Amino acid sequence: MAAFQFEVVTPERTVVHQDVEYVSLPGMDGQFGVLANHAPLAAVLEIGVVEFGARQGERDFLALGGGFAEMHGNVLTVMGNTAELAHEIDVERAQAAKSRAEERLAQKSEEVDFARAEASLRRAMARLKVANFRGNRK
């Protein structure tokens, strides 16, 4: 299979910089895949899971806190608000963040920023899902 360069960058660091055969990204209308020689692309990305690696076989995962993707030539660049690889995720911290967000959403108070609490819940759930992928690969 043909490979292409895949990189994920955040304001703090470069998270991924490697050749891959396949990437699945969380787009505004759902997950979409990218292969080598894809047409030029610019897309807004949601909070969710990024899957990347070989087209067939084992893949790696990361939790993305939203961002943008650009495919230019045979280079796919994801500019994420946040990004964590599976082995970097602190499961207890993610579970605590999920619980806090659920508590905020359960409150029926005008003082709660529901959009922010919902985004926190989606980020925590993506992190837990990616951590679960890691656990299943051990």
Image: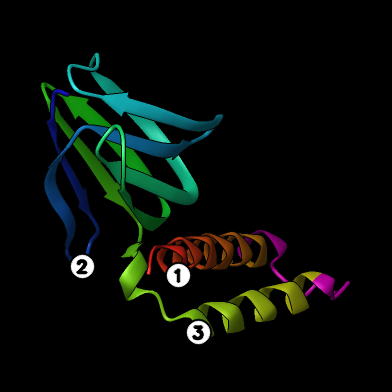
Of the 4 image quadrants, the one containing the N terminus is top left
Give, as a three-letter code, the residue at label 2: Glu
**Percent position of residue 66, x then y:** 43, 50
Dominant secondary structure of the magenta stretch? loop
Label 3 residue SS:
helix
Q: Earlier in the sequence, mark 2 or mark 3?
A: 2
Q: Position of residue 46 (x, y in %)?
A: 49, 44
How many C-alpha atoms fall within 10 Å of the one at disc 3: few (<14), some, or many (≥20)?
few
Residue 12 is tagged as 2
* Residue at x 20%, y 39% (from the top left corner): 77
Residue denoted by label 3:
93
Which mark is first along the chain, 1 or 3?
3
Q: Is residue 3 left or right of residue 28?
A: left
Residue 130 sits in which quadrant?
Answer: bottom left
Q: Amino acid at mark 3?
A: Arg
Q: Nearer the viewer, mark 3 or mark 1?
A: 1
The three-letter code of the residue at mark 1 reads: Gly
Q: Say if 70 sits above or below 121 in the image.
A: above
For the point 13% across and 23% down, the residue is 2
Q: Calculate the distance from the C-alpha at mark 2 to the C-alpha at mark 3.
A: 20 Å
Where does the magenta region start and end?
106-116
Q: Is residue 16 above or below residue 123?
A: above
Of the 4 image quadrants, the one containing the C terminus is: bottom left
Do the CB atoms of the residues marked 3 and 1 lie less than 8 Å apart?
no
User: Is 75 on the left or on the right of 112, as rendered?
Assistant: left
**Residue depicted at x 29% and y 32%:** 55
> Where does label 1 land, which residue?
135
Magenta residue check for 107: yes
